[in-house]
Amino acid sequence: MAHAQHAPQLFGVFYAYLPMQKSMNPKTEQKRSLSPSLSNFSARPFILVGLLIAFLTISNLAIAFTQPKDRINGELWIINRVISGQTVEASIANKDNTTIQRVRLIGLSAPLKEQSPWGDRARQRLSDLIKEQKVILEFDVKQKDNSDRLLAYIWKDNLLVNQYLVSEGLAIADSSAPNTKYDARISRAQSKARLQELGLWDTQNPLRLSPRDFRRQLGN
């Protein structure tokens, strides 16, 4: 009987505890309901960044494909000899007994052989690239200099050799009006070479004197 008397009291305590448990549940549920939204909120910046990167990538590709390519108006020549990093001897291809002419690359100034090791490096790289190869010579406004050399841009397939030499730190961008068609391209190539400290821009072993100033000292 004692147990029977205590039973209602125990059940009363039990039922009294249930409302307390229920009253705690909304807070718990609220926390649970909030946690997904918080995680979504924290992920939003990453999603936005990803979308922005994708947008910029697609935009750049669209510009690259829609932007007109440089039109090359030139002639097919054969490089017979490489004299320096900026001068070659060439003859018109597909013509017998054609005259060999000296050609000065436009838009750059390469070190002389006396500017060791830069002069030899520029000459050797140019020789490896185009010697005894068929190339396209593209002329600009002024076609000859005071030394009667042809002034030209040299294209090896789709590679603008003038720009390439500057991009590798083998020559310095050197604009010479009125021949300025590719000045912007060559200037950008030099900026990248300087940032990467390539070739004559190497801070550990830089070219101390520009080719133009060096030639002035020699009286060339």
Image (tube, rainbow, N blue to C red):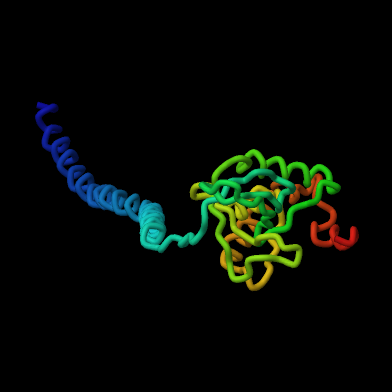
Image position, residue 90 (x, y; %) = 63, 49
- Quadrant for the C terminus, please: bottom right
Image quadrant in which you'd find residue 214: bottom right
Image position, residue 38 (x, y; %) = 34, 53
- Quadrant for the N terminus, please: top left
How many labels were placed on the picture? Answer: 0
Q: Residue at x 84, y 54 (%)?
A: 208
Q: Residue at x 36, y 53 (%)?
A: 47
Q: Nearer the viewer, residue 205 or 133?
A: 133
Image position, residue 179 (x, y; %) = 62, 69
Query: Does residue 213 appear to the left or right of 95 in the view shown?
Result: right
Query: Does residue 218 appear to the left or right of 177 in the view shown?
Result: right
Q: Kindly give the residue lying farthest to the front in the view shown.
A: 97
Query: Does residue 122 appear to the left or right of 51 in the view shown?
Result: right
* Residue 195 visible in the current orientation: no
Query: Does residue 211 appear to the left or right of 9 in the view shown?
Result: right
Q: Residue at x 75, y 47 (%)?
A: 202
* Residue 27 visible in the current orientation: yes
Q: Nearer the viewer, residue 94 or 86?
A: 94
Q: Residue at x 57, y 51 (%)?
A: 92
Q: Kindly give the residue lying farthest to the bottom in the view shown.
A: 178
Image position, residue 145 (x, y; %) = 71, 66
